[in-house]
Amino acid sequence: MFLRSFGRQLLRAPSSSSSFLSANVSRAAARSVSQAAVYRNSLFCGSRALARHHHHHAGCGCSGSASRLTTKRGSTAAGTVASEISAAAAAAGAAAGIPRMQMGAVITKHGSPEEVEFKQIPVPEPGPGEVLVNIKFTGVCHTDLHALHGDWPLPAKMPLVGGHEGAGYVVKVGDGVTDVKLGDRVGIKWMNGSCGKCEYCLSARESLCPHILLSGYSVDGTFQHYAIGKADHVTPIPDNVSLEVAAPIMCAGITVYRALKEAAVQPNQWVVLPGAGGGLGHLAIQYARAMSMRVVAIDSGADKEKLCRDCGADVFIDFRKEADVVAKVKEVTGGGAHGTLVLSTSSKSYQQATEFSRPGSTLVTVSMPPDAQLNADIFWLTVKMLKICGSHVGNRLDSIEALQYVSSGAVKPVYKVQPFSTLPQVYSAMEAGNIAGRIVLDLSL
Ligand code: 8ID
Ligand code: ZN
């Protein structure tokens, strides 16, 4: 019943203000913000280059012959943020023009990365309760790839501008918006809006709202320069967190932070993370360590092993090299996971997770591989008294808290910045499982 009404909502034609097809008013030229400085701590250099771009290597020790990619690890960046804040103030004060048309990455049907078309589309107009955000950086989440493939049992809007890890400035506010101001630095997350009135919204479980609007899925998202967010749902970005650092938090960070709360692992207990080297995974390691949990990271390859260890994993298990992942987890944890977040996009991980879960523990489903089933033996489920729960992003307070961990320096997203135009290559690399951490697209490139 719930799913049916959820689905109906998603089928519903998006409001005209949220659709890139909507007509709207024009102004003059776009602003630009100075290119974010390259971070000091380059963690490693991508050996499998995804695309060429012009960032300089920052002491990563790599010859850099194949590419100019630099992986960054950032919590805060004072210089960058200062220039972003002054740019935002200028934007708010100067009544700078908003163009009528903009470049967007559009898909008109599901399929392979070649379906992504870069084209001129109208800048949407914020309706009542909405804000228009000039997106500067956006992460690329595996959910965007599911939307491209169309492999979920939930219809997406079509044509679709994907993307739901956006960070930028508010450049226009719709009627009735009072708390969000022009020039505010905000994030647009997966949950673009919710009704605010249903039993779920009233109890701060808005990710269950039957009227939820999903950025880059049921409404156009952040793979465009100007995106719409509900004023009640855009997330304020702390002053000392740069926009490119904030971007991966807007989905990956929020989601794993909330899922760790659901797992209810106590300090010094073991949380096990299949998929630990991906976008969600590398942040889950860091939030878990910040909450004093011990971490078993499961993923594959030297890049991801290094990433997981650098993020604080106590143990790394390579699922391609380890003959018996279940036995290994039980061995290193002395009896199994006290809690598990499945973040891997392979359904095999779910089977293994039910087996290596410690009696009395919680298994949280986060990743959504197509057609995956949880095939747990009921006898063992019962006598082990396992709890299995789903976790869908987080609420607005989770979102604010997830950014606070970054603001304090406890969590540092690891990401590579690439030009907007490389989105199709990012999808291909993601299909191949070749991305350690996150890719963040710079919309100005
Ligand atoms: O709210 C939610 N529940 C939510 C929010 C955001 C994302 C759910 N997601 C979902 C996405 O839709 C996707 O299904 O979480 C999943 C992971 O998203 P991601 O972190 O953005 O994906 P990624 O960066 O591609 O990382 C996936 C990792 O899984 C590893 C890969 O090597 C990769 O590092 N992996 C695979 I494929 N098979 C594995 C295995 N058998 C495995 N790791 C361990 N064991
Ligand atoms: Zn996501």
Image (cartoon, helix red, strand yellow):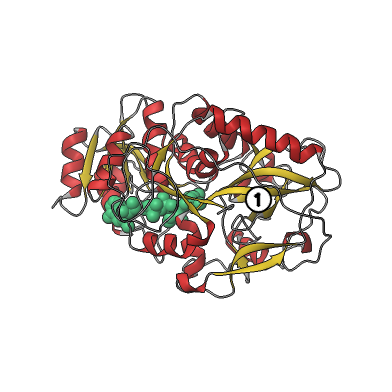
Q: Residue 51's image quarter? A: bottom left
What secondary structure is marked by label 1?
A: strand
Instruction: Please report the residue visible at 38 percent of the width from the left and 45 percent of the height from the top.
Output: 70
Instruction: Please report the residue visible at 72 percent of the width from the left and 43 percent of the height from the top.
Output: 170
Instruction: Please report the residue visible at 64 percent of the width from the left and 63 percent of the height from the top.
Output: 103
Residue at image mark 1: 192
Q: Position of residue 443 (x, y in %)?
A: 58, 53
Q: Position of residue 143 (x, y in %)?
A: 48, 57
- Residue 60 in view of the camera: yes
- The quadrant in which the N terminus is found is bottom right
Q: Residue furthest right?
A: 175
At label 1, counting other C-alpha atoms closer than 10 Å, the crowd grade (few under 14, some 14-19, many 20 or more) is many
Kind of residue at badge 1: Asn
234 lies left or right of 422: right
Q: Position of residue 191 (x, y in %)?
A: 61, 49
Q: Residue 295's image quarter? A: top left
- The quadrant in which the C terminus is found is bottom right
Q: Residue 22's image quarter? A: bottom right
- 227 above or below 178? below
